[in-house]
Image (spheres, grey):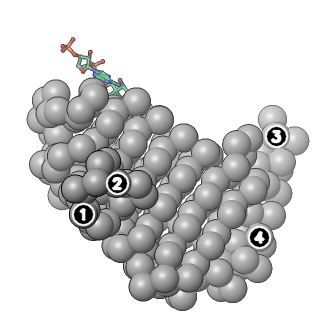
Amino acid sequence: MNISSSQISIGKLLAVLKGAAVLPLKTSSVGRLGRISGKLTLKNKGRLIVGRNVSFHAKPFPSSVTVERNAELIVGDNVFFNYGLDIGCTQSILIGSNTIIGPMVNIIDTNFHPVDMEDQSRGKSIVISDNVWVGRGAVILPGVTIGANSVIAAGSIVTRDIPSNVLAGGMPAKVIRELQITKEWIRRYN
Ligand SMILES: CC(C)(COP(=O)(O)OP(=O)(O)OC[C@H]1O[C@@H](n2cnc3c(N)ncnc32)[C@H](O)[C@@H]1OP(=O)(O)O)[C@@H](O)C(=O)NCCC(=O)NCCS
């Protein structure tokens, strides 16, 4: 038991050191105690603002975060990104504090390709509010706002706004039920 708890703390320490080495170079601003474990590809040609105590857990599968020129990705405090993350930010993505992003989640604020000749659509901003949990394998599509405290069930495709304090899921994601969450209740990931 002692060995495993010391391994855990060494792992965390290494993640803090990697975060301290990489995040200040790759972000426009970062709070303290940012952590990176595994392989995270961070491309920031715009504005990437990362809050305090944000963890990128990019193993066993790597993660990728791309912020294009003139785009802005803002991440709040105490956010956990699990492995296989893929964020493509061409306009604006806001991820609130105390949010958990599950494994293999994709968040893109543009479709990247036109649907047909008449499709003039550009990117549309995404807002993932405070205290949200996005389950494994969910896809958050352009223009979506997810309200505070809500949960997106595993494998969902979120094409439209989701209100606060609900469990939503499916393809496309719909409200499944309301959640009982008080103001003080904060999601914790470890
Ligand atoms: C949402 C979840 C947490 C289950 O929550 P729950 O409150 O126990 O929900 P239930 O299992 O009672 O299901 C409630 C309803 O939602 C539906 N539902 C549950 N998960 C769903 C999903 N992923 N997609 C679509 N519908 C889903 C159920 O079928 C059920 O529908 P019904 O009432 O018509 O039968 C779980 O299904 C899930 O998605 N977990 C994600 C885990 C994860 O990603 N972990 C990664 C670590 S961060």
Tag 2–tag 1 contact (CB < 8 Å): yes
The residue positioned farthest toward the right in the image shown: 3
**Residue with the mark numbered 4:** 18
Q: Nearer the viewer, mark 4 or mark 3?
A: 4
The crowding category of the residue bearing disc 4, from other C-alpha atoms within 10 Å (few below 14, some 14 to 19, many at least 20), is: some
Query: Mark 3 or mark 1, which is nearer the start of the sequence?
Result: 3
**Residue with the mark numbered 2:** 114
Query: Mark 3 or mark 2, which is nearer the start of the sequence?
Result: 3
Query: Mark 3 or mark 4, which is nearer the start of the sequence?
Result: 3
Q: Nearer the viewer, residue 144 or 119?
A: 119
| Quarter of image, res 126 | bottom left
Q: Is residue 113 left or right of residue 37?
A: left
Query: Mark 4 or mark 2, which is nearer the start of the sequence?
Result: 4
Q: Residue at x 29, y 67 (%)?
A: 122
| Callout 1: CB less than 8 Å from ligand 1 | no
What secondary structure is marked by label 3? helix
Q: Nearer the viewer, residue 175 or 184?
A: 175
Q: Residue at x 56, y 82 (%)?
A: 45
Q: Position of residue 97 (x, y in %)?
A: 36, 66
Label 2 to label 1, Cα distance in Å?
A: 7 Å
Tag 4–tag 3 contact (CB < 8 Å): no
| Callout 3: CB less than 8 Å from ligand 1 | no
Label 4 to label 1, Cα distance in Å?
A: 41 Å
- Residue 156 lies, with reference to residue 130, above or below; the image says above
- Residue 17 lies, with reference to residue 181, above or below; the image says below
**Residue with the mark numbered 1:** 120
Q: Nearer the viewer, residue 40 or 167?
A: 40
Q: Is residue 126 left or right of residue 176?
A: right
Q: Which mark is residue 4?
A: 3
Q: Residue at x 47, y 35 (%)?
A: 136
Q: Position of residue 107 (x, y in %)?
A: 42, 53
Q: Is residue 164 left or right of residue 60?
A: left
